[in-house]
Image (spheres, coloured by chain):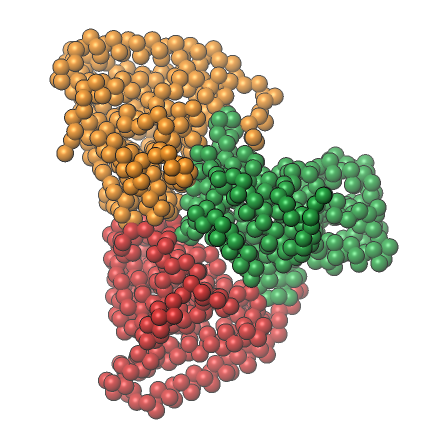
């Protein structure tokens, strides 16, 4: 298999991994095993995988409340991630963070975040440090369309532009901030204008096409690595689930959902690989089986992990 | 002669709001109009039906919406601005502490800011650090804000009605765990004055001061204590600003023993302030050192066992009462 | 495109400007006497925009301003004695000494909270506009703020909401960063925005904008304000007007200094030439002298301007006497006015 084919099948594997992971989380949540709420990213896999593919372990990401996909795409392992979501001691954060604040310094993950837009200044800060270190590291922050109206986004973009920070602002526009449609709360007829106002290169990308996401991300990462400053990418995408598991989704139109389901990034990419003979059906099936096994093991690992002992509490509070 | 009906806390909030909206055309609701009612949010349907033009859903822009509420209030409206989770109100802290709270004094009395800010505080279960904030102690330390902490349906209906009448900026703080709690509530329109505490349970042995959801937890603890022969008196201040200091001092004057329960972190929390007040003004009544039962000085962890370990509970209240009874 | 207003309008604008200027000269004098309370900010060199907008404003508009409020307040008609008394922290002040120069306000003239937190007035202004819109009385809100406010996130949030809900508000951004020496030079921090032209920011939200690179163009600014207020009152939503002025040399250091001396109208007549370090600023950038020259060129008689100035100086003298004589507030009343 060529290098390129290997990379592409790896991209496919990662998207399948996220999709299956999220389905298991949904099922565990319905069974009462997950403390708090979870916000699943099914449908948005291309965005996470394509954006993280050009990144190394020592590049940074800051994620949002809908972050499991980013975490997996950036290299976190499904077992300890699942354990963290279940609040168990073998989780990445010892059960303290849960889904909303899970982080992993080893893979440069500054964490998911429960505050809309909360990770954006963190990513810019990491970028500032990266620039000082001069090793070509970059930072990526993910946020949703709901965050576009957070003042913090503008403050940080302004600074990133003035200081030419190696940070990439990625807005995963799935059309809804919680239960509210983007058009109801966002003035102006151009979303990219919010980056262009600071002369930050900004573009709209089909977030359901992993190759388009990959191309845009590679360009932005490359620009940042060579000192060319920030970029603002808007990935038009869709979440097949609700804002959180349990959301009745009565604000969504059936026709709209069907139209987006027809653009499902995973079968779409599979077709692409098959049509161009970059993979064959049995190869893809093997990938899917491999993922299923990996997820099964992850769930088992997570469920087997004990809850953290309260006596442990003060351990992680201060350095 | 009052007609009473059993209603949930969620329904009582909406009932009070509906009465306010009906009585005063200046009242407008801004922000997420589900108010954190969660599974009980269908109660808001009647407001959407009866007052469709008085509910406005805004973008996720806490600072601007908080400031909008303050500015509209200065200009003669009575906005009710909902933040949702109290943690998010911290994004608007400047608008609360630097604008709303100070305008009256800064202007020498010319400007009033009759805005109500609504939020849900406290440990709700799995919320972790950014969905579990109880900011009332911080806000009590920002003079100029009224602060309301209802503990039950009857209180919330009357207090919310009053909050939309006062000419001061009011922070109205509810709790997710109270939403489904039911009790008998008068059907008619009524208001409850600020600065008037209520004795939720009379008792001769120990005064337990509690607010919000902790009133429920304290009442449950009191039942257990009664089985041991300890009769606890639960004092619910209902508002922190204005604060009914006299009620607390009178109760401690009778019992001589004080436990204060509060969901804010221990240091500089509500409990600390109330204990300090009693130590200064009611020292001679005390037969034992007062006890604070509060959240641990820690961000809230996600895992349920860890979360429980840092949150006040019946067990920790009972322990504190035992200490004070020795 | 500029409208040339009726010269009577221009004279009224000039009167406001001269009142602002003489007030600020008095403030600098009081500072020299060491009786000004706390740090203060003067409006010298920026009078044109404020006066032109205030001339366009109706009696029922609601106004918001910032720490740089002296010009807006006196230009709108606030009693200069009570204004100065407020700066001196006296009981006779507009705010009974509680707000000082940073929060001076006059509710009877339509001013709401005067905020000294950068960006603070912008959300308040959209709130005022929100209330006015609901009242359906065709009134508008006017917000005065500086270029620094455009770095604050809440400003962006507020612009988004103003545009979304078509709120009746006129945003007046008085950009005085031209010629500022910046923090490194011992002066004020100047605005640090990647938006090379500040009007690009409100345009992100499709808010109509006007920019006056010549911030002393009273005719143009007045016309723009008239148009913006008509748009707001008519339900057409917000407008953003930016005016740029070359910073007065006395406002360059952190504490204002009387760098250009007392304004002498004779310099407009040509009877005197500006001298000294800042002669160029006086000659080219002083808005008061410029508008005086325009009035004279338009046929206004010198004696009209002189009489106006004499009257204003009398009023300011009387105001200063009132302010200095006003007692300090009784400390027993320190807790007054916290709550209604």
Measuring from the top left, give residue C233's x and y in whole percent.
31, 35
Seen in the image, is A251 located left or right of residue A189? right
**What letter labels the chain drawn in orange?**
C
Q: Position of residue C234 (x, y in %)?
A: 29, 37
Where residue B72 appears, x then y in whole percent?
A: 44, 38
Estimate the x, y position of residue C100 in percent, counting from the top left. 45, 24
Say whether residue C216 is visible. no
Q: Which residue sits furthest bottom? A: A282
Residue lying farthest to the right in this orientation? B229
Name which residue lies at 27% across and 54% down.
Answer: A189
Is residue C211 in sight in this rendering? yes
The picture quadrant where one finds residue A94 is bottom right
Whether residue A166 sits left or right of residue B321 in the image: it is: left
Quadrant of the rendering where the N terminus of chain C is positioned = top left
Asked which quadrant contains residue A302, the reply is: bottom right
Q: How many marks?
A: 0
Quarter placement of the C terminus of chain C: top right
Q: Tell me the shade of chain B.
A: green
State whether residue A89 is above or below residue A274: above
The residue located at (62%, 62%) in the rendering is: B307
Name the one closer to the observer, C170 or B307: C170
| Residue beneath the point at 76% across and 56% down | B221
> In which image quadrant can residue C196 be found?
top left
Q: Colour of chain A?
A: red
């Amino acid at each position: 298999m060529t290098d390129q084919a290997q990379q592409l099948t790896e991209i496919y594997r990662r998207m399948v991994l996220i999709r299956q992971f999220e389905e298991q989380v949904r099922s565990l949540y319905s069974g009462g095993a997950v403390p708090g709420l979870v916000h699943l990213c099914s449908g948005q896999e291309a965005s996470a995988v394509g954006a993280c593919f050009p990144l190394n372990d020592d590049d940074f990401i800051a994620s949002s409340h809908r972050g499991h996909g980013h975490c997996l795409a950036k290299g976190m392992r499904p077992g300890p991630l699942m354990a963290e979501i279940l609040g168990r001691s073998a989780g990445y954060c010892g059960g303290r963070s849960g889904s909303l604040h899970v982080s992993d310094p080893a893979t440069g993950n500054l964490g998911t975040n429960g505050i809309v837009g909360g990770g954006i200044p963190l990513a810019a800060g990491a970028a500032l440090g990266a620039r000082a270190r001069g090793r070509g590291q970059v930072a990526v922050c993910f946020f949703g369309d709901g965050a576009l109206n957070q003042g913090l986004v503008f403050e940080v973009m302004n600074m990133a532009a003035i200081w030419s920070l190696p940070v990439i602002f990625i807005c995963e526009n799935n059309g809804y901030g919680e239960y509210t449609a983007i058009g109801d709360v966002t003035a102006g007829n151009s979303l990219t204008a919010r980056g262009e106002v600071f002369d930050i290169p900004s573009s709209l990308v089909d977030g359901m096409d992993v190759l388009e996401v990959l191309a845009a991300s590679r360009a932005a990462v490359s620009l940042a690595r060579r000192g060319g400053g920030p970029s603002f990418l808007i990935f038009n995408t869709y979440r097949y689930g609700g804002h959180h598991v349990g959301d009745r989704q009565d604000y969504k139109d059936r026709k709209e959902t069907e139209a987006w389901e027809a653009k499902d990034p995973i079968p779409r990419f599979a077709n692409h690989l098959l049509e161009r003979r970059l993979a064959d059906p049995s190869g893809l099936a093997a990938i899917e089986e491999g993922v299923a096994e990996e997820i099964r093991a992850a769930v088992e690992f997570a469920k087997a992990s004990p809850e953290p002992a309260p006596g442990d509490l003060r351990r992680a509070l201060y350095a | 002669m009052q007609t009473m009906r059993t209603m949930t806390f969620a329904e009582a909030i909406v009932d009070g709001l509906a009465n306010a909206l009906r009585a005063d055309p200046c009242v407008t609701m801004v922000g997420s109009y589900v108010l954190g009612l969660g599974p009980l949010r269908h109660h808001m349907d009647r407001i959407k039906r009866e007052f469709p033009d008085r509910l406005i859903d805004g973008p996720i822009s806490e600072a601007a919406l908080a400031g909008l509420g303050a500015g509209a209030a200065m200009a003669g409206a009575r906005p009710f601005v909902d933040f949702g989770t109290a943690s998010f109100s911290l994004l608007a802290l400047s608008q609360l502490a630097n604008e709303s709270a100070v305008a009256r004094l800064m202007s020498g009395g010319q400007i009033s800011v009759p805005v109500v800010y609504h939020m849900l505080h406290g440990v709700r279960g799995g919320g972790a650090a950014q969905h579990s904030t109880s900011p009332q102690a911080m806000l009590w330390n920002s003079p100029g804000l009224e602060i309301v902490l209802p503990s039950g349906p009857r209180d919330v209906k009357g207090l919310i009605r009053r909050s939309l009448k006062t000419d001061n900026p009011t922070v109205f703080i509810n709790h997710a765990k109270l939403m489904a709690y039911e009790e008998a509530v008068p059907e008619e329109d009524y208001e409850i004055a600020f600065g008037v505490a209520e004795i939720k349970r009379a008792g001769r042995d120990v005064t337990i001061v509690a607010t919000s959801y902790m009133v429920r937890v304290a009442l449950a603890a009191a039942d257990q204590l009664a089985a041991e022969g300890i009769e606890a008196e639960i004092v619910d201040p209902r508002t922190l600003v204005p604060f009914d200091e006299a009620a607390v001092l009178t109760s401690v004057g009778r019992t001589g023993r004080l436990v204060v329960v509060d969901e804010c972190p221990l240091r500089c929390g509500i409990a600390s302030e109330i204990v300090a007040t009693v130590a200064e003004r009611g020292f001679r009544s005390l037969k034992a050192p007062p006890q604070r039962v509060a959240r641990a000085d820690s961000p809230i962890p996600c895992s349920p066992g860890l979360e429980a370990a840092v949150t006040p509970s019946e067990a920790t209240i009972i322990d504190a009462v035992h200490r004070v009874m020795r | 495109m500029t409208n040339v207003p009726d010269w009577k309008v221009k004279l009224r604008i000039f009167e406001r400007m001269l009142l602002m200027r003489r007030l600020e000269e008095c403030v600098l004098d009081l500072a020299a006497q060491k009786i000004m309370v706390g740090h203060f900010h003067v409006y010298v060199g920026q009078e044109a925009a404020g006066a032109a907008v205030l001339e366009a404003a109706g009696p029922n508009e609601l106004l918001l301003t910032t720490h740089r409020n002296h010009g807006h307040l006196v230009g709108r008609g606030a009693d200069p004695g009570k204004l100065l008394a407020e700066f001196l922290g006296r009981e006779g002040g507009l705010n009974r000494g509680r707000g000082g120069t940073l929060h001076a306000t006059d509710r009877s003239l339509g001013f709401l909270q005067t905020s000294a937190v950068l960006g603070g007035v912008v959300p308040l202004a959209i709130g005022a506009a929100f209330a006015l819109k609901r009242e359906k009385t065709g009134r508008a809100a006017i917000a005065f703020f500086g270029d620094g406010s455009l770095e604050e996130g809440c400003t962006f949030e507020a612009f988004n909401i103003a545009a979304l809900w078509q709120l009746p508000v006129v945003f007046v951004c008085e950009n005085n960063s031209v010629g500022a020496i910046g923090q490194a030079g011992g002066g004020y921090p100047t605005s640090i925005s990647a938006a090379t032209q500040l009007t690009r920011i409100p345009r992100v939200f499709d808010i109509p904008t006007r920019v006056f690179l010549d911030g002393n163009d009273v005719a143009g600014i007045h016309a723009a304000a008239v148009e913006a207020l008509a748009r707001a009152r008519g339900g057409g939503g917000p407008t953003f007007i930016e005016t740029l002025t070359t910073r007065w040399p006395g406002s360059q250091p952190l504490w204002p200094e009387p760098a250009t001396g007392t304004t002498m109208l004779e310099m407009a007549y040509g009877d005197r030439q500006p001298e000294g370090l800042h002669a160029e600023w006086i000659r080219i950038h002083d808005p008061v002298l410029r508008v005086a020259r325009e009035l004279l060129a338009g046929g206004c008689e010198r004696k009209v301007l002189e009489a106006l100035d004499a009257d204003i100086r009398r009023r300011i003298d009387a105001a200063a006497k009132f302010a200095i004589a006003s007692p300090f507030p009784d400390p027993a009343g320190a807790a007054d006015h916290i709550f209604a």
